[in-house]
Amino acid sequence: MLATQGQCQLRPLAPSTQAPAVKWLVRCSCNAPCPVNSAGANVPAGCACNAGYSGAVAALTSNPFYTSSCSTVACPANSAGASVVAGCACNAGYSGSVSAVSSSPFYTASCAPLPCPANSAGPPSNTVLAGCTCNAGFSGTVSAVTSSPFYTSTCSPVACPANSVGANVPAGCSCNSGYSGAVAAVAMSPFYTSTCSEVACPENSRGSNVANGGCSCNTGYHGAITSTSTSPYFSGSCNLNVCSCSWGTAATGTSCVSHGHNICTNCSSGYQLSGSSCERRTCSSYSCSGGWQQKGDPGSITCAGDACTNQECCYNPTPVTVTSCGSTPKTFTSASSGTLQVTLVSGSGGHGGDGDTGGQRATVQGTIPVQANSEIKIYVGCQGGSGSGHMGGGGGGASAVTVNGVVKLVAGGGGGAGMGNGSNLGGSAGAPNGTSGTGSSCGTQGGGGASQSSPGHGGRGNGGKPSGESGNSDGDGGNAQGCSGRKGGQGWKRGGCSNDDPEDGGGGGGGAGYKGGGAGGTGCHGGSGGGGSSWAAEDVTGVSWSVSGQGDGQATFSTP
């Protein structure tokens, strides 16, 4: 029979002859197991407190044959929980973990303060636990939590404020075009400061502000103002208008409402305002008195004063005739502004010595505008000298009118005839271009007629005889070589002289004119001179040209 007491076993011994009574054998096996919260083979072999427990297990000889102080370890600093064994979690704002171990201090802990997350900061330690605030330009909050990532953050970039543009405030915002100032990030609501303000309209312009095309130039100025994003935050300018005015005074300042336009404020003498322009004050509704007659086109005659006068709009129908020819002009001064109606007749070319006929004279008519107190000179051309024997005739002189020294009207002279057995003719005067003189059948050439732009060429001589000279650009007629014949007629410009060739025929002189005619060549029969050209200035109206007749010139005119 086996009996158990504690950790000892009682075994009966078999009876013997020497010991008939029953005896018991006591066998103790001290193998008490490790108590709760400890681990090991058994108490005698040694027990250690479990991980997360602190204390010790010691063997005793009395029941329960051990002592045990294994007790749970509290959660370490920066963590919380019932005990290490039950489980500890890092406090909010700390990252890491707590684990139980069997050696002192019976845990491992890595709970460390969490740094402030992106877009936030917290002096001085810059940890979530100490407190983090969103960076300048970011709005939101940062809070500590106990689960990964151990914080919550709503820090987000603030959008660019009104009147500015950019990705966001932290990335940078600039004021809109037409606004001046700056946007800066700050850490307090609204997380930015902005000084973007509207730029006022610049000098000489008006409007609410530069932004959005809000400025226009003041009256009397032109240009444009456009907003920009760089100082001075606009481009362009408004400049003073400049106006023109034909026949008057141009508007200036605010009166010049449209740049570059014809806008007048007052008009010159003889003109009157019509709207913003000056128009001529004319004689179109004027009645003449004292037997005078209205001038040809009264609507084209400008009146100097506020009312037209008899002298401006009318003329004395009794003309004045000048018959004295030569280089000395008839001179007079106009009493008033108006027009000078003139008929000029030039001198014809002189005849050749064998009955050859000189070139015909020109008749030119025109109406010349003149102002009061203008100096008017009238020149009358003379006929060229007529030859005898083998002489040619001289070129005719030119008649002309000048006003204050400016040529207005010219009648060209006829070309002198060369000596040619009665068959040669001098070139006619200009109507308006002169004609060429005739040559001879044996080859002598006549001089060329002048045009309004070029003098006539000289005629070629025959059989080695001299050629005639070309006419002059200043109006004198070309001379026959040697000038041994007759002189040309005098006038505004002189006709060319002729030649005498006792063996053959002498050439005729060129007619004078605006451009001179060429002289004829000398030869078996002399060539005749070309006619000079006639001409009228651009402001001369009613111009007519004709050629006819022989003799000295004359001039007929009606004074203003």
Image (spheres, helix red, strand yellow):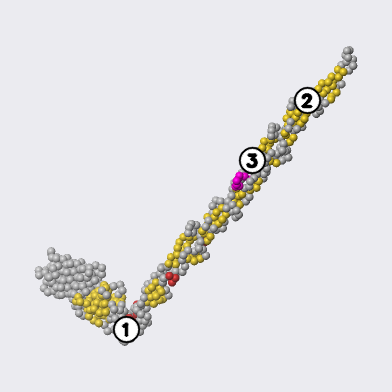
Q: Is mark 1 on a helix, strand or loop?
A: strand
By secondary structure, the bulk of the magenta-drawn segment is best described as loop
| Label 3: which secondary element | strand
Number of marks in the rendered image: 3
Q: Residue 528: image x %, image y %?
A: 17, 70
Image quarter in which the N terminus is found: top right
Corner quadrant of residue 508: bottom left
Residue at point 27% right, 73% down? 406
* Amino acid residing under circle 3: Ala
What residue lies at 83% left-to-right and 26% top-to-bottom? 6
The segment highlighted magenta reads: 121-128
Above or below, 5 against 245 in this view is: above
Residue density around tag 3, few if under 14, some if 14–19, many if 20 or more, within 10 Å: some
The reply to whether residue 54 is in sight is yes
Q: Distance between the residues labelled 3 and 2?
A: 45 Å
Instruction: Please check the rendered image and state whether residue 547 is part of the magenta-colored stretch, yes or no.
Output: no
Amino acid at circle 2: Asn
Q: How far apart are marks 1 and 2 (CA)?
A: 167 Å
- Mark sitting on residue 112: 3
Mark 1 is on which residue type?
A: Gln
Is residue 442 shown to the viewer in this render?
no
**Residue carrying label 1:** 293
Crowd class of label 1 (few under 14; some 14 to 19; many from 20; radius 10 Å): some
Q: Which of marks 1 and 2 is in front?
A: 2
Q: Is residue 21 left or right of residue 211?
A: right
For image coordinates 41% across by 68% down, the residue present is 242
